[in-house]
Amino acid sequence: MNHKAIYALYPTVVTADDAAGAFDTQGNKVVIDEAAVAAWVDPDAYKYSRATAYPTIQEQLDMQYWDGVNGTTIWADTVASVKSENPKP
């Protein structure tokens, strides 16, 4: 069960349990359209992809230092590449 999708698609849901189902504030069971949940795309997914694709902060600082010393743009090119490979929706 994709809880994030359920909470995004069904704002009245306050609890979602894999075994029991989804419930609103009064404890009423909310019927979930599994196809809609499966089709839901997390609007923040690009953030997670970018976070894992970026070099570490230490590596980025080293890139920036050497770019300054050598007059290169390796750091800016690396960041731009990550952003273009993981665009915002």
Image (cartoon, rainbow, N blue to C red):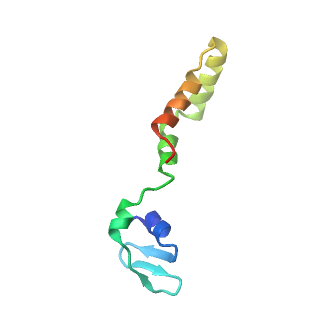
Residue 34 % position (x, y): 34, 69
> With respect to residue 16, does 65 lie above or below?
above
Q: Residue at x 42, y 83 (%)?
A: 29
Residue at far left of view: 35
Between 46 and 17, the residue placed more toward the observer is 46
Picture quarter with the N terminus: bottom left
Q: Residue at x 36, y 60 (%)?
A: 39
Between 34 and 64, the residue placed more toward the observer is 34
Residue at far top of view: 70
Q: How many marks?
A: 0
Left of 5 or right of it: where is 56? right
Residue 65 % position (x, y): 65, 21
Q: Residue at x 59, y 31 (%)?
A: 58
Q: Quadrant of residue 80?
A: top right
Q: Quadrant of residue 56?
A: top right
> With respect to residue 30, does 87 lie above or below?
above
Left of 62 or right of it: where is 33? left
Residue 74 % position (x, y): 56, 21
Left of 36 or right of it: where is 76? right
Q: Residue at x 44, y 74 (%)?
A: 16
> With respect to residue 23, does 41 lie above or below?
above
